[in-house]
Image (cartoon, helix red, strand yellow):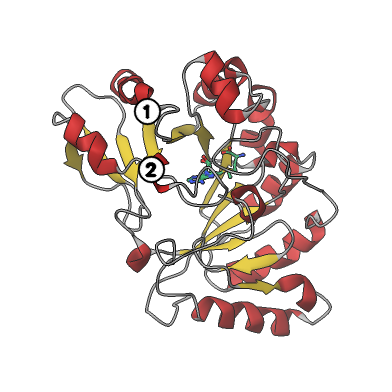
Amino acid sequence: MRDQLGRDIEYLRISLTERCNLKCIYCREETEYCQAKQELSLSVLTRLMHIFAGLGITKVRLTGGEPLVRKDLEAIVSMIARIPQVRDLSMTTNAQGLAERIGGLHRAGLQRVNISLDSLQEDRYRRMTRGGDLQKTLAGIHAAIREGMIVKINAVLVRGENDAEIDDFIALARDYPIDVRFIELMPFCTLSAADEKRIAGQEILDAHPELHPVAARYPSQPSADYQAQGFRGRIGLINPISHRFCRCCNRVRLTSDGKLRMCLGQEKETDLKAWMHHNDEELLSVIRSAIFDKPKAHEFEENFHATRAMNQIGG
Ligand code: SAM
């Protein structure tokens, strides 16, 4: 459906849980406690998905927290994959434990995976994720590629943490047929709110004049893509702050506790749980008017203070 600014809203990101097996330093505080009790059940998700599909959602990404911590993930994937309007079904994951489940997820209907990988060095990976095992994520990446899935790598750059590895990440896109996307830090916890930690994509381009722009793979793509001679994959720069792409934003988010959030960088949410005892028509009308009112742009640069960490919203 169209929002008040004429943007076609066709993309829903569903956060299945705020729980995560990692605690990435830029995502949330070390001491944050996560719980499962607010999570939307398979039957609630099924009802909501049919309503969203009726409103024109054709593209769905599962995220969290970490979607792999949900034991019913395969059943959720299969439910969404069977909805005829949904043409694109993907997941964002840290891939810890993905290798064992990728076959089942693929068979259930998952088409693509974006895998978070912030360092190619074991110690740094463990430090940035507060306990993650790099080998498990690499095994997940290899398993997904073997499975024939489209794989993209997401790296959040944090100055003083992993910026020394930018060249190594770029080399991945040179040597393998995968896209590596550098995501600009957004302010969702103490560390990520520090402006001096943010690395804008332009800094990468200045250091790598060999990278030249290539056409986007699809119109509302958030990343600006680059390649150099001989590259098998692409480098994508996702710069929500230094190069905001709100004008072509086509997405809304459903949080794991049932809130519809129209913009990552605006706190306003509509509590769909409060409407679950209404009939489908009333629920649809609440969702429709929330989407219609989707804000014009994020407020990251206007004294934005996140009340929820990224894992609680769904990145
Ligand atoms: N657990 C999954 C994962 O690690 O990919 C999915 C959830 S995670 C919150 C989704 C995405 O949000 C990841 O690519 C992560 O790197 C990104 N992210 C988290 N906090 C961020 C921040 N402060 N700024 C930019 N991206 C962030």
Vertical placement of residue 256 versus 196, above or below: below
Q: Is residue 140 visible?
A: no
Report which residue position mark 1 lands on.
Answer: 163
70 is higher (above) or lower (below) than 263: above
Q: What is the x, y in percent for residue 244?
A: 33, 59
Circle 2: residue type: Glu
Q: Amino acid at mark 1?
A: Asp
Q: Which residue is mark 2?
A: 196
| Residue at the image position 35 percent from the left and 19 percent from the top | 168
Left or right: where does residue 5 sit relative to residue 108? left
Q: Residue at x 57, y 48 (%)?
A: 189
Q: Position of residue 2 (x, y in %)?
A: 44, 77
Q: From the viewer's side, name the closer residue of 29 and 91.
A: 29
Which label lies toward us, 2 or 1? 2
Which residue: 82% across, 49% down?
36
The local secondary structure at tag 2 comes to helix
Specify the quarter for ligand 1. Answer: top right
Residue 57 percent across, percent down from the top left: 53, 65
Q: Measuring 41% from the left and 71% from the top, which residue is drawn there?
A: 8
Give how far apart the Cα atoms at labels 2 and 1 are: 13 Å
